[in-house]
Image: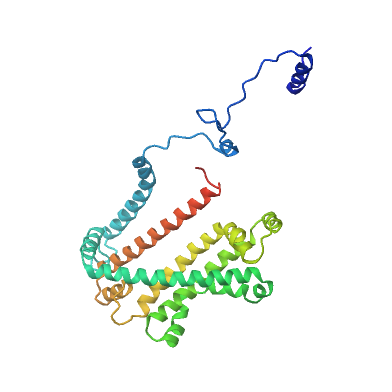
Amino acid sequence: MPIKYPSARAGLDGVSGETATPRTPAKVGVNPEGSEVSGLDALELGPQTDRGTLGRRIWRNTWPKLMAIAIVVLLWQIVVWSKWKPDYVLPGPGTVFGDLGDVLKTGDFWDGVLLTLRRAVTGFGLAVLIGTVVGAAVSRFAPLRAAIGSLITGLQTMPSIMWFPLAILLFQISESAIMFVVIIGAAPSVANGLISGIDYVPRTWLRVGQVLGMKGFAKYRHLILPASLPSFISGLKQGWAFSWRSLMAGELLVIVPGALSIGVRMQQARDLSDSSLVICYIIVVLVIGIFIDVLFNAADNALRKRWGLTGS
């Protein structure tokens, strides 16, 4: 009579003294030598796929961007061919890229780029520091959120250029005026990103942390802040966009003597009615912005992959 459950069959075999035919266990997570078990993590790993060579993957990610650039350049050239504006007002891609090549060979240009990037990094770093402190405080204390929560959102939506008249009155024509606008433009986005991330931390995780004895700073350091990282990185990315735009506006409006930044050089090109050079600096600002965005996307993708939110 067949027995339904293998465990029952094993018990009867033990009682009757019969020798049961041993079954070979399924080899899940066993290394080639068969001496160690790799653990339950192996069960979550999907089959490895052939993603191709490094060069092929780079090309697969690059060609859409190159196609987009080619389409934009083609449309630009069509507009120039249409004679909508004279060539000295709207030069063609060939003229602009030729002038851009000449500009890139000069040392003064790179000095201006370094000055602008130093301002951007300094202002954004201070904005991240201030925004993180404010965001953590607002999310921690309910009365503080009721008092300034809406104010932070209002500051985030306010155009940065509106702050420049006040910044000039407070700090005159100086680096401090530019830094003031960059910080006040980026800090609210960073704070809101952190507040949103903390608000959406699962309540179950908070209860687990309480059971483990996490309190005060340790609770924020080891539980709340890591759990809010995805939203916080989105806030950082948005804060960078605000700070970069504020900086470009500041360099056009607040010209510090002796500081030949990208914005100052663009303003000088406009004063000389050199449209080709103006477009050159527009391209430079665009390329820098795209490069920083790629860095943020790489950090975001790495974090999502670490959290298992994307495919490996």
Q: Nearer the viewer, residue 235 or 70?
A: 235
Give percent across and percent down for residue 63: 35, 46
Give residue 70's position: percent from left, percent from top: 32, 51
Q: Quadrant of residue 73?
A: bottom left
Residue found at x 54% / y 68%? 132
Instruction: Specify how the rendered protein is coloured.
Output: rainbow
Q: Is residue 159 visible?
A: no
At horizontal 52% and vertical 63% (from top left) the residue drawn is 235
Q: In the figure, is residue 298 to the left or right of 101?
A: right
Q: Residue shown at 34%/71% (left/top)?
A: 116
* Count of numbered labels shown in the rendering: 0
Residue 77 coordinates in the image, percent (x, y): 28, 57
The percent position of residue 275, horizontal first and vertical second, equals 26, 69
In the picture, residue 135 is in which quadrant?
bottom right
Near-viewer residue (250 or 310): 310
Give the residue furthest to the front. Answer: 17
Asked if residue 122 lies left or right of residue 76, the reply is right
